[in-house]
Image (cartoon, grey):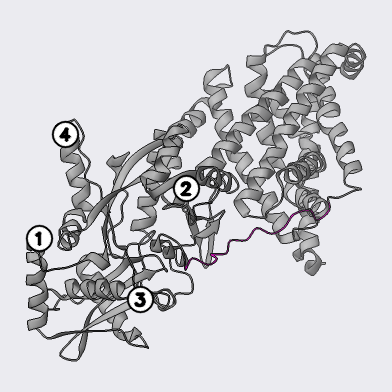
């Protein structure tokens, strides 16, 4: 007996027994408060219900269930199941219709979803069910708190509502800055702000429609909707927490206990009619629909990187380590809140990158954005109403025409002579000395601060294996290295790592060697990567703040280093549907840059940077 109770079936049976007991006790307490002849009066009221009110309540029920199905669409996008939206909404509606009537919402809903969607496992069905239940409860808490502050509500709800509303901004900020929580060895990715905003929107529609249905079914019209709404939300929350089938017992008891006087007969009449229309009928329809589950009608979405060896922008190689992928010839990089279309499309005949990133972002509940794109891509975005901001300047040289003999290269020649005098030897070995490179990377980080990530390279063996790597030795010891993304059309500087004790001019010599090799291979474009833009706002205060941001991002030092090669500075832009979303996107990118995750397949305990990323907050 004890083993059975400790098993999964025993635990579920015990939970169901507790829920039924709670409902029975609540009904017993409620019945004791009713007067003699109460049920006779309720029966008479049910027979006299206005047919138009019943029809309108049924319409509100339909609207509510349309909103309920959208919860699952958000959940499927968050968990990346690839299920078509219509199937996700249909299965979610059926699952919720059964779960809210039968009780044990998480388990019942999971079984219904598993039955309706043959492409998902039971484990995924449980994850979907838990996601929907938890996010709905959070949204219900917020909506109930706001409603209790706006409309007449029981006095005991005032301070809890104030606490919820006042702590909401801090909670949203925490979610934005810490999108992943860790519990032991398990990590959970929290819903994005876009996902929560969708859940909140559909919750408002769902709850308003359901409360309206109940209000329409209460005969007499003596209780106003402003009184019914907060009471409905409080009673619904209590019913969901109890887990009783249909919330029977706790819902009625809480509703009556908080009711500010009035005749109880019309109220109970409305609740009984509401349960028939909002609970019983949808549950019967759901059971009938479960007889025919959906067929396997979708293909798993591919997130492959694909062939980028001929891409016009070599820097696209960074998606090998930041979780990016190729879709419709655009390089996409998912952050916690944003999906960025990096750089320009990979081919000239690519589909509209704005449409691509918008569709892909919607499928992941993320904010769409363009990042580090040229004017060729930024201009169509502006024409479509997107807000565009100049965020970076890219240093570009033409290796074929590059020559250091002219006067502008005086500073570079001095650096090269210093390295030559120190007997710096540049090489490209067939096998990389990874332990020595890791040592250089570690010392570099100790000197320069923590590693950066995002659209900048992170040191990892699997990553540099795809790159052109140049090593600098001094007296037989590795003192620096530089790596370059390569395609058949361009090279791009990525990692720059130098021992603090390396002779002056070492890094200049590494880059110069790469420029010469690119010229010998006929490469007409070599990017020294980007530095933060130097905006010129009209306000003197904004000029000062912009200078601070650029300095914090490492801009002046990088610009000075790259200026030694006399590059052509080309502006790069970021764009999003509006100014607010661009601000959120840039903050999200900055968070990903300054708090990078572990590179895929990386066994190193340290990793990262080169050119101090490009998301100055004031750029938006």
First to last magenta residue range: 295-309
Q: Which residue is mark 3?
A: 468
The disc, 3 or 1, on the residue closer to the chain's N-terminal end is 1
> On the picture, is 573 further left or further right than 230?
left
Mark 3 element type: strand
Q: Which residue is mark 1?
A: 408
Q: Which residue is mark 2?
A: 338
Dot in front, 3 or 1:
1
The crowding category of the residue bearing disc 3, from other C-alpha atoms within 10 Å (few below 14, some 14 to 19, many at least 20), is: some
Can residue 601 be seen by looking at this rendering? yes
At 84% from the left and 12% from the top, the residue drawn is: 52
The disc, 2 or 3, on the residue closer to the chain's N-terminal end is 2
Q: Position of residue 118 (x, y in %)?
A: 80, 57
The disc, 4 or 2, on the residue closer to the chain's N-terminal end is 2
Q: Position of residue 583 (x, y in %)?
A: 37, 39
Q: Which residue is mark 4?
A: 541
Mark 1 element type: helix
Dot in front, 4 or 3:
3
The disc, 4 or 3, on the residue closer to the chain's N-terminal end is 3
The disc, 1 or 2, on the residue closer to the chain's N-terminal end is 2
């Amino acid at each position: 007996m004890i083993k059975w109770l400790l098993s999964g079936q025993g635990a579920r049976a015990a939970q169901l027994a507790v829920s039924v007991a709670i409902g029975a006790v609540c009904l017993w307490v409620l019945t004791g408060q009713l007067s003699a002849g109460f049920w006779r009066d309720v029966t008479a009221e049910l027979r006299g219900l206005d047919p138009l009110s019943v029809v309108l309540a049924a319409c509100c029920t339909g609207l509510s269930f349309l909103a309920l199905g959208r919860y699952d669409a958000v959940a499927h996008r968050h968990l990346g199941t690839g299920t078509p939206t219509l199937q996700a909404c249909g299965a979610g509606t059926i699952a919720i219709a059964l779960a809210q009537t039968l009780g044990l919402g998480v388990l019942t809903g999971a079984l219904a979803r598993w039955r309706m969607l043959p492409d998902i496992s039971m484990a995924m069905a449980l994850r979907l069910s838990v996601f929907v239940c938890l996010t709905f409860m959070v949204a219900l808490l917020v909506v109930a708190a706001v409603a209790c502050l706006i409309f007449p509500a029981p006095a005991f709800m005032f301070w809890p509502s104030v606490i919820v509303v006042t702590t909401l901004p801090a909670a949203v900020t925490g979610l934005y800055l810490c999108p992943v929580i860790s519990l032991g060895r398990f990590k959970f990715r929290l819903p994005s702000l876009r996902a929560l905003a969708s859940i909140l929107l559909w919750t408002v529609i769902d709850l308003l429609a359901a409360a309206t249905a109940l209000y329409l079914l209460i005969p007499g019209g003596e209780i106003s909707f402003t009184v019914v709404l907060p009471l409905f939300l409080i009673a619904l929350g209590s019913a969901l927490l109890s887990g009783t089938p249909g919330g029977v017992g706790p819902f009625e008891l809480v509703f009556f206990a908080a009711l500010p006087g009035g005749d109880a007969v019309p109220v109970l009449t409305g609740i009984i009619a509401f349960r028939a229309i909002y609970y019983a009928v949808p549950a019967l329809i759901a059971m009938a629909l479960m007889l025919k589950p959906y067929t396997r009608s979708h293909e798993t979405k591919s997130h492959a990187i694909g062939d980028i060896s001929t891409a016009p922008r070599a820097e696209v190689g960074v998606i090998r380590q930041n979780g990016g992928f190729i879709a419709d010839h655009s390089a996409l990089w998912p952050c916690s809140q944003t999906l960025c279309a990096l750089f320009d499309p990979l081919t000239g005949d690519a589909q509209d990158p704005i449409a691509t990133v918008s569709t892909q972002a919607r499928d992941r509940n993320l904010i769409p954005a363009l990042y580090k794109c040229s004017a060729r891509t930024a201009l169509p975005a502006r024409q479509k109403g997107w807000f565009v901001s100049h965020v970076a300047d890219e240093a570009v040289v033409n290796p074929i025409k590059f020559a250091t003999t002219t006067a502008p290269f005086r500073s570079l020649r001095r650096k090269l002579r210093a390295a030559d005098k120190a007997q710096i030897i540049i090489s490209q070995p067939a096998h990389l000395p990874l332990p020595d490179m890791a040592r250089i990377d570690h010392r570099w980080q100790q000197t320069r601060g923590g590693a950066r990530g995002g659209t900048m390279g992170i040191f990892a063996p699997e990553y540099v294996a795809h790159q052109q790597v140049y090593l600098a030795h001094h007296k037989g010891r590795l003192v620096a290295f530089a790596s370059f993304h390569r395609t058949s059309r361009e090279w791009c500087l990525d990692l720059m790592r130098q021992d603090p004790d390396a002779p002056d001019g070492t890094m200049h010599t590494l880059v110069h060697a790469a420029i010469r090799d690119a010229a010998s291979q006929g490469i007409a474009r070599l990017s020294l990567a980007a530095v933060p833009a130097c905006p010129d706002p009209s306000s003197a205060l904004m000029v000062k703040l912009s200078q601070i941001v650029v300095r914090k991002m490492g801009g002046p030092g990088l610009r000075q280093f790259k200026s030694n090669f006399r590059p052509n500075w080309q502006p790069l832009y970021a764009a999003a549907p509006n100014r607010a979303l661009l601000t959120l996107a840039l903050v999200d990118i900055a968070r990903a840059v300054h708090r990078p995750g572990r590179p895929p397949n990386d066994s190193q305990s340290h990793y990262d940077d080169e050119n101090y990323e490009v998301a100055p907050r004031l750029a938006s």
